[in-house]
Image (cartoon, rainbow, N blue to C red):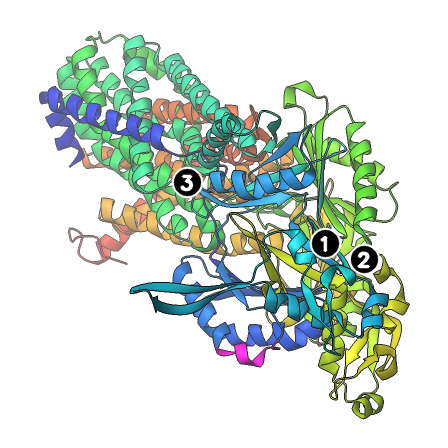
Amino acid sequence: MSFHLSAWSIKKPVPTVVLFLILGIFGLVSFFRLGIDTNPNIDIPAVMVTVTQPGAGPTELETQVTKKIEDSVAGLGNIDELTSTVTEGISTTTVSFVLGTDSDRATNDVRNAVAQIRQDLPQDVNEPIVKRLEFAGGSIMTYAVASETRSVEQLSDLVDRTISRALLNVPGVAQIDRLGGVDREIRVDLDPSRLQAYGITATQVNDQIRNLNIDLPGGRGNVGGSEQNIRTLGSANTVEELRGYRIVLPNGATVPLSSLGDVEDSFAEQRQAASLNGESVVAFSVLRSTGSTLVTVEEGVREAVAELQGTLPNDVNLELIFTFADAIRDSYQATIDALILACILTVIAVGLFLRDWRVTLITATALPLSIIPTFGVMKALGYTLNGMTLLALALAVGNLVDDAICMIENIDQHLDMGKKPFQAALDASREIGLAVVATTATIVAVFIPVAFMGGIPGQFFQPFGVTVAVSTMFSTLVACTMTPMLSAYLLKPKGNGQQGTGKKRIHPYRNILNWALRHRITTLLMAVVFFIASLQLVPLIPKGLFGSGDTGLSTVMVELPPGSTLSDTKDIMAQLNQSLQENPAVEKVFATADQINSATVYANLLPKDEREVSQQEFEQQMRQVFRTIPGARISFQSQGAGGGGKDLSIVLKSENAPALTQTAESLEKQMRDIPGLVEVTSSTSLVKPEIVIQPDPERAADLGVSVGAIARTASLALIGDNESNLAKFDLADRQIPIRVQLDPETREDISTLKNLQVPSQNGTLVPISAVADIRLGSGPAQIDRFDRNRQVSVEANLEGIALGDALEKVKALPAMNPLPPDVAEEPAGDAKIMQDIFTRFATALGAAILSIYAILVLLYNNFLYPFGILVALPLSVGGALLGLLVTQKELGLFALIGIVLLMGLVTKNAILLVDFALAGMQEGKPQFKAVVDAGVSRLRPILMTSVSTIAGMMPIALELGADGEVRSPMAIAVIGGFTTSTLLTLVVVPVLFTYVDNLYHWIRGLFGGKKKPVQL
C-alpha cells in the first residue's frame, strides 16, 4: 500500500499538499485550545462520609459510628481502599474506588448504604454527610486579604460572602477554603453562679431561646374577602431585643436573658489562624475540580480576582501568596524549548550526514508535519499539554525524521545511479516502502499494550504512548507522501562519482561485518555475555518512582502534642517563620493552623536563577535548623505521586491495638538508624489529656439522673449545642448561630464542671459531682483505620537515598522480620505506586514484544525471520542500564517509559537490515553477499537515524530548563540503550539472520523444497 501511496503523491502533488495544509491548520487550532497541566489527570474516584458528634472521643466514635459506616459500604463493588480517620468529634471515612468507576453512581451507592444504617448510629450525632471528592489534590493557589482599616471579623465575612461566591463561578473551581479569620455568631456566655442561684440549667436556657427566637409559618387565613398567609415571627430584630428575652425559671418566675450572663454580637471560639511573613492575616485557598486543568483554572481565578479587586472597597487588597501554576508553566516552557532545540539539533545532525541543503530541508519538513497534526489527535482524545505528552514529542523528535531519512537516503542512492529525481523517487519509495511501514508498526505495537496497562501507571503511560504512536504514524504518512513528492520536484540529478566515495567511507564496517560472519559463534557469545553482564548492573542502580523537581515552593508540616492550644501552635509558627525568613533563598513565608495542634507552613523560594541553592539543598539546610525548635514534629511534605505527607510510608494494620502500637514503635526506632532516612515519625496516636466523668450507677439511679442527661448538660454548657440545633439570629441577608454556653473564663476551673446542675426525673437539679466521679485521664487523640482494621503509618523523608533502596533496607529490619501474627503490612504511598508500576510494566513489556513479533510475522509472512529482528531488544537494555548507572539516575517511572520507547526504536534498525538482506536474496545474491551488501547499504541511514535520535534527546538528557532533573532519566535510558543497540545491531543482527535463514531453508527442505514456509 505504501509504495502505491508514494507513487500517487509523486504524480499528484496538489492533493498531498492540501491534505497536510488541512492537518496543519487542525493541529494548530487544537494546540492553542489544549490545557496545560503538570501530569496526566489521575484523579481517583472517591466518596467521603463525615459524621460529627461534638465533644465525642475517638474511641467511642470508632465503635459507635466508624465501624458501622465501614461495614455498611464494604460490600459495594469496585472499592480500592477504605480509610478512616477518627478525631475528637469527627469520623471521616473515605471510600476510594478503582479508576474508571462512575463516581456519581458510586456516591449514590455509598449514600444509600449509609442511609440504611442511620438508625443504628447514636441519636445525637449530626446527620452523616456523604459527598464525592470534587477537588483534585490540594490547593492550587492562595491569596491573602489585607486591609489597614478593617477588623478580622469584617475580612472573614468578606471572604465568606463576597470573594468565595465570586470565585466559585469560575469554571473548574470546586471549593474556596478560608484560612485564618473567625466565624461571626451571637454569644450567650452564662454565669454558673447566677444559673445556680436561679435554679436553671444551661440546657434549659438554650431550649427556651431556640423555641422563642424562631419564625414559623402559621397557615392561611381568609379575612375581609381576601386570602392571607399567616406567619409567626418570634426572631429578635436586634441583639438588644435578644438580651431582653424573658427566660422562664422552674418556679414560674421570669428574668431577662441578660441577667443570666453576657449576650453580645461576637465571633466563635478561634480554632484556626494564618500569618504571612509573621503578620496575622485572613487568607483563602482555591481547590480545583476533578478533570479540570490546573493552569486554565488558575488563569480564570486570576482574571476573576482582577475583576473583583475593582468592586471591593479601596482599602481591601488581594495579594497572591503562591500558585502551583508558575512551576507548571516553567516546566511547560522548558519542555517546549527542549522540543524546539531537539528539532534544531536533529536537522543539524541530518545536514552533517547528507551535506545537501535541499535534502536536509526535505527531511526537516517531516518534523512540523508530524508534530502539529498530533496536537489535533491529543485534543480529540481529551489530553492536555502535560509533562508526559510534551515529553513524548520531545523524545520522539529523532524518531520522527527516521522514516523520512530512510526514504530520502534511498532516493539519494538511486540518484547516485544516475536516475532523474522523478524516477529515483518512484523507484526508491517502492523499494523501501515495506520497511518504513514495518518500522512504524513496531512503534505502535510497543505502545498498544503499554498504553492500556491500567491503574495509576497506565494513566502516565497512556498519553505518552498514544502521543508517540500517533506522531510516528504521521511521520510515516509524511515519509510515504510528502518526502518522495518533494524529492521528485526539488532535488537535482547527480553524476555517478559519489557512489565510490560512499563505499570508501564505509569500508571499515565491511571488514568488521565480514569478520563477524566468519566467526558467528564468537560474535553471538560476545552478545550473550554483554546481555548477561548488563543484567548484573540492576542491583547497582537506584530505584524509585520519580525524583522531586524544583518547584520553588517547600511545604512544612507541623504537629504539636495533643492537648496543645492554638496559642502554642502560633508560637511554633512564629519561630518557623523567623527561621525560614533568615534563609536568603526564601522570598515569603505563609503559615496556617488548620487545627488546634497542627499547622502547615509554605516557604515560597526565590526564582531558581536568583538563589544559590536548589530546593532539595534548601530543605537539607532547614532540617538542621528545625531540630533546634522544641515541642513539635516538623517535617517537609513529600512531592511524590502517592499524595502522602512523606516520601516513604510503611502502613501496618491490625485489630490488636497493643501489638500494633508496639510493632510500630519498634519499627520507628529501627528506621531512625538507617542512613538517608530523615524526619522519621509514627502516626501512633499520642495520648490526649481528658477529663473523665464516671457516673455512679447507684447514686444516679437514686436521684433519677440518666447518663444522657449528664453528657448533654456537660456538652452544652462547655461547647454549646450541635450546629444543626443552634438557634439562629436573622440578619438582612443571612442567619448566624446563637451559641449558648458557660462563660469561657469559668470553664478553666474544674470545680465549674463539678457544680453543673443536672435535671433529675422529679424535676429537681443536682450537681454532677453528686451522681458522678470527675477525674483527669487520657485517651487517643486520633485513630486511623485501613480496610476495616486499625492502622499505623511509620513515615520518613529521603535524603540521598532512592525510594526502592530505602524500602529494601526497611523490609530487612528485625521489626519487619517477621511481623507479629496479627499485624500485617499494607503497601501505601509512593512505594505502592512503584510496586504497581514494576509489576504492570513487566507484563506490558512482554505483551509489547509479542505484539512486535505478531506484526513482523504478518509483514514478512514468516514465523522465523522476526527472531532475527527481535535480538536487537536485549542488546539495548545494557546500554540503558549503563547510562542510568553512570549518571546515578533512578530506575523509576520515567526511565521505564524510556525503555519502552527504546524497544520500538531499536527494532527499526534491525528491520532495515533484514528487509534489505531478504531483498538481495530474492534478487539471486548468495546469502553472505546479500547480508554484507544489506549492512553496507543501510549503514548510513542507520547511523543517521541513530545520531538524529540521540541529538534530539540531548536537551532533555542535559536537564535543561525547569524540572529537567525529573525528566532526564527517560532520555538517558534511551540514549544509552540506542547507542549500544545500534553498534551491536549492525554486527549481531546480520549474524543471527544467517542462522534464522538457514533454519528456515532447512525446515522448508524437509517439507518439499518449494512449499510455503511452515507455520511453526
Q: Tell me which amino acid carries mark 2.
A: Pro
Say if 995 sits above or below 86 in the image: above
Mark sitting earlier along the chain (1/3): 3
- Point out residue 413 in the picture as x, y percentages from the top left corner: 25, 18
Does residue 240 show up?
yes
**As rendered, which of 928 and 961 lies closer to the eye?**
961
Q: Residue at x 17, y 27 (%)?
A: 19
Q: CA distance from mark 1 to mark 2?
A: 38 Å
Does residue 534 show up?
no
The residue pinned by badge 1 equals 795
Q: Circles 1 and 3: CB distance less than 8 Å?
A: no
Q: Which mark is residue 171?
A: 3
The residue pinned by badge 2 equals 744
Q: Which residues are magenta?
A: 116-123
Q: Tell me which amino acid carries mark 1.
A: Glu
Q: CA distance from mark 1 to mark 3?
A: 37 Å
* Image quadrant where residue 261 sits: bottom right
Q: CA distance from mark 2 to mark 3?
A: 43 Å
